[in-house]
Image: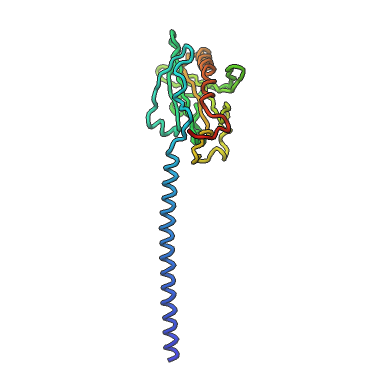
Amino acid sequence: MVSEVTDLNHSGRAHAARKGIARVAAFAAIFLVATGAGYRAAASALDAALAERVELPRPIKSLPMEFGEWVGEEVPLSEGVQKIAGNDDYINRIYRRSGTREAVNLYVAYTGRPRTMLRHRPTVCFPNSGHSHLGTEEIQLRAGATTSPALVHSFMKPGAVDVRTVVLNYYVLGGDVTVDEDSFWGVEWRSPNLARDAGHYVAQVQIATNADIDNGPARRRVTQFAEATLGEILELLPKSGDHGGP
């Protein structure tokens, strides 16, 4: 009888243990489902938040269509290009100088999530589309009493007729002009900006024109246009410390 009682007690303990394990397993399954659902809900909410654009108090399209003799027209980008760029606002325009055959392409892109601008620069994008990079020089733009840096790049696309292009570009970071991509490479610029703070941004300005074998006229053209537009572009973009949204 003792042995029988002992066997019965052992059987009861085993049954209780199995029930305990089952409860733990059930709790673990519920926990995993709940946390998985919570994760999916959080990820979905984050994706929805990131899909909302960071809006400027004044959209970039409010940049004037005329700068002296230069008259612009809109050239919309395809949805595919917009998706790759990942910008919150942009303009892409052709400006033509009245009474001449001179023209420049002005592209201004704004993003409230500066990390999306990394690697978007002429020396990456143009070679990716088949252009050879011929060289780059840094210049100083003069607008009123101030000077600001800019880079002037030269490219050539080989073909039956070689296509040469001169591209001037610079960035605006918190209201300041820079040509150094490393200035918005740090951790503080990689946040998703869920508050959609319009003052936490980087903007890229790119001015391109066709060139001859002698890049001199094209270089002067993009420089003159950059100097004519610099003040208006800086006036449009928030200054450091302007943290309010629209």
Viewer-proximal residue among 150 and 230: 230
- Return the residue found at the far top: 99
x, y percentage for residue 133? 50, 24
Q: Is 187 on the left-hand or right-hand side of 32?
A: right
Furthest-left residue in view?
Answer: 79
**Residue 85's image quarter?**
top left
Image quarter (top left, top right, bottom left or bottom right) of the N terminus: bottom left
Check the image and report above or below for 139 versus 128: above
User: In the figure, 234 relative to 32: above or below?
Assistant: above
Q: How is the image coloured?
A: rainbow
Residue 241 placement, left or right of 99: right
Vertical position of residue 59 compared to residue 1: above or below: above
Observer able to see residue 162: no
Query: Measured from the top left, where is residue 8 in percent x and y?
Result: 41, 84
Instruction: Name the residue at 43% across, 33% down.
Output: 84
Please tell me which residue lies in front, 243 or 169.
Answer: 243
The image position of residue 51, as x and y in percent, is 42, 39
Q: How many marks?
A: 0
User: Image point 61% across, 20% down: which residue?
Assistant: 147
- In the picture, measured across the screen, residue 158 lies left or right of residue 143, that is left
Return the x and y of residue 242 as percentages of the image width and height: 55, 32
**Quadrant housing residue 183:** top right
- Quadrant of the image occupied by residue 136: top right
Residue 165 visible to the viewer: yes
